Image: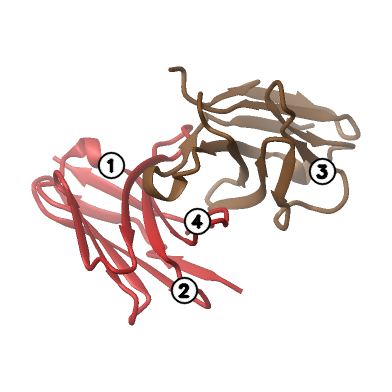
Chain colours: A brown, B red
Amino acid sequence: NAGVMQNPRHLVRRRGQEARLRCSPMKGHSHVYWYRQLPEEGLKFMVYLQKENIIDESGMPKERFSAEFPKEGPSILRIQQVVRGDSAAYFCASSSDRGEDYGYTFGSGTRLTVV
Amino acid sequence: SQKIEQNSEALNIQEGKTATLTCNYTNYSPAYLQWYRQDPGRGPVFLLLIRENEKEKRKERLKVTFDTTLKQSLFHITASQPADSATYLCAPGRSGYALNFGKGTSLLVTP
């Protein structure tokens, strides 16, 4: 079991470009969560998805950011027209329906740098 | 809105001592609280869960307490080792909702 796979590990984008971050949840997990972390800052919740549905997107900026978790394939966090302030580590986590019992399994993150 | 506070200052302790980390929360009534460990450049790793009806939970050298009246959880690492050096995150939660995390407390265990 490979755990939660995120790719790419590092992503460099110029201002105005699009960034696509991918997350394959752990086998058997149907809940996916995206978090953002800045240096010396905590994990900030962005969005919670469950196969094909967005459950909670209250932490995601209304503009430029979108997320999906299709029936087939990985979850995608998409950032359009990136700005320098989007530079951060983006972590994906997954859980089973028993997430409160067994916790979240996190990926190693994607480090986005906007130049 | 929900607020989660953890010791902002790093905790430095000597090997073999007990490390105690604090997590306080406000404007929230969690049904459980989870603790995670995060190493530099890595994603957090789940350590322990304690429910609102449990006062204390143990796992090997780890002990967690949960006081819903004080709205506080304490996380203890006994007989600490340099390998325990990491940042520890708390996350109070409720079923059906995504977790929000505290900023974490950095622990450094020196030989």
Q: Earlier in the sequence, mark 4 or mark 2?
A: 2
Q: Are marks 1 and 4 in contact (CB under 8 Å)?
A: no
Q: Can you say which quadrant of the picture contains the N terminus of chain A?
A: top left
Percent across and percent down for residue A35 are 61, 45
Q: Are marks 1 and 3 in contact (CB under 8 Å)?
A: no
The chain ID associated with circle 4 is B
How far apart, in angstroms, are the residues tagged by discs 1 and 4? 19 Å
Which circle marks residue B38 in the picture? none
Mark 4 sits on what residue? B101
Percent across and percent down for residue B59 are 18, 46
Depicted B37 relative to depicted B41: above or below: below
Q: Is residue B48 left or right of residue A2?
A: left
- Give neighbour class at mark 3: few <14, some 14-19, many 20+ (Cα, 10 Å): some
- Give neighbour class at mark 2: few <14, some 14-19, many 20+ (Cα, 10 Å): some
Mark 2 sits on what residue? B29
Q: Residue at x 56, y 56 (%)?
A: B96
4 and 3 marks on the same chain: no
| Local SS, label 3 | strand
- Give neighbour class at mark 1: few <14, some 14-19, many 20+ (Cα, 10 Å): some
Mark 1 sits on what residue? B85
The chain ID associated with circle 2 is B
Q: Earlier in the sequence, mark 1 or mark 4?
A: 1
Q: Can you say which quadrant of the picture contains the C terminus of chain A?
A: top right
Q: Residue at x 43, y 50 (%)?
A: A100
